[in-house]
Image: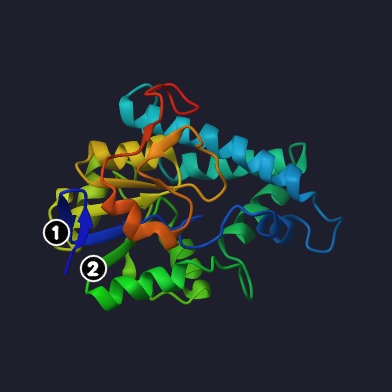
Amino acid sequence: MSLPYGSTEVDAVLFDLDDVLVPFQTPAAWQWAWRPQGPVLGERRVRAAVRRALKEWDRRRWNGLTGREAPVDLAALHAHLRASLAAVAGHPLPEPETEAVVRRLLHPAGEIERFPDVAPALARLDAAGVRWGVATPLPADAAQWLLRRAGIDVARLLLAGEGPSPLPSREAFRSAVARLDVPPERAAFVGDLFWSDARAAARAGLVALLLDRHDAWAKVQSGRITSLDELESGLASGGPPEPADGGPADSEE
């Protein structure tokens, strides 16, 4: 079965994992990872710090994709998480503490937060007979850990951060789509970053949909949804994620 995409259709949906299917860099997650028994972190301050860090990470991944910097890898991801932690804490932490906190963020214990729109969206895809899978730049063990905590079958994980060409490379997108047994132009990728998710997927030949849960990409109008409740309607509207005025979306290409 297929889903309408403008005047054509898509046969499969590929999801990013962190902050798309599973809440990841949230105030509660950083609170637990850094100091579960310590002072309560200010939610607004943490969200602002994480938002800035994610914008920098999006730019770093895009620069790696376009040749301005070296391509990102797991070491670059680790550096991003360390930088996010320093921003959340308001200052750099000692090395052993930094490593312990990042490790806990990647492998949360007990129950984790869940997005209420995820299970219904995946159920609708299953009911419609539309294939779907997960691709992520996170390490495979962390991705599997988060999927299990969220109640999602780890067999849905098609691509993780190991390997010579992780996301957002063209090879990574196409490798994941090949495992869904569809050509790139018949697959949609849903990610939460404008440049290194949506634009990168489009460069690889996929249909791209930007999931902007926290209004971080307000200039982007087409190809943008704020909840997976809008997944089908967002695809049906057709067109790649683009700023409403045609200008840069909070970052220069």
Number of the label disc, if any, that sits on residue 151 = none
What percent of the width, then of the height, locates residue 37?
Answer: 84, 63
Q: Residue at x 73, y 51 (%)?
A: 97
Residue sitting nearer the eye, 48 or 127:
127
Q: Residue at x 26, y 48 (%)?
A: 173
What percent of the width, then of the height, locates residue 128?
Answer: 24, 74
Which SS class for mark 2? strand
Q: Residue at x 57, y 65 (%)?
A: 107
Which SS class for mark 1? loop
Number of the label disc, if any, that sits on residue 182 = 1
Q: Amino acid at mark 1?
A: Val
- Quadrant in which residue 31 is drawn: bottom right
Kindly give the residue lying farthest to the right in the view shown.
39
- Compute the Cα span from label 2 to label 1: 9 Å
What percent of the width, then of the height, locates residue 68?
Answer: 37, 21
Residue 116 in view, yes or no: yes
Residue pointed to by mark 2 = 131
Q: Amino acid at mark 2?
A: Arg
What percent of the width, then of the height, locates residue 110?
Answer: 64, 76
Residue 169 in view, yes or no: no
Q: Residue at x 33, y 56 (%)?
A: 233
Q: Is residue 190 left or right of residue 107?
A: left
- Quadrant in which residue 180 is drawn: bottom left
Q: Are marks 2 and 1 in contact (CB under 8 Å)?
A: yes
Q: Is residue 179 left or right of residue 45?
A: left
Quadrant showing the C terminus? top left
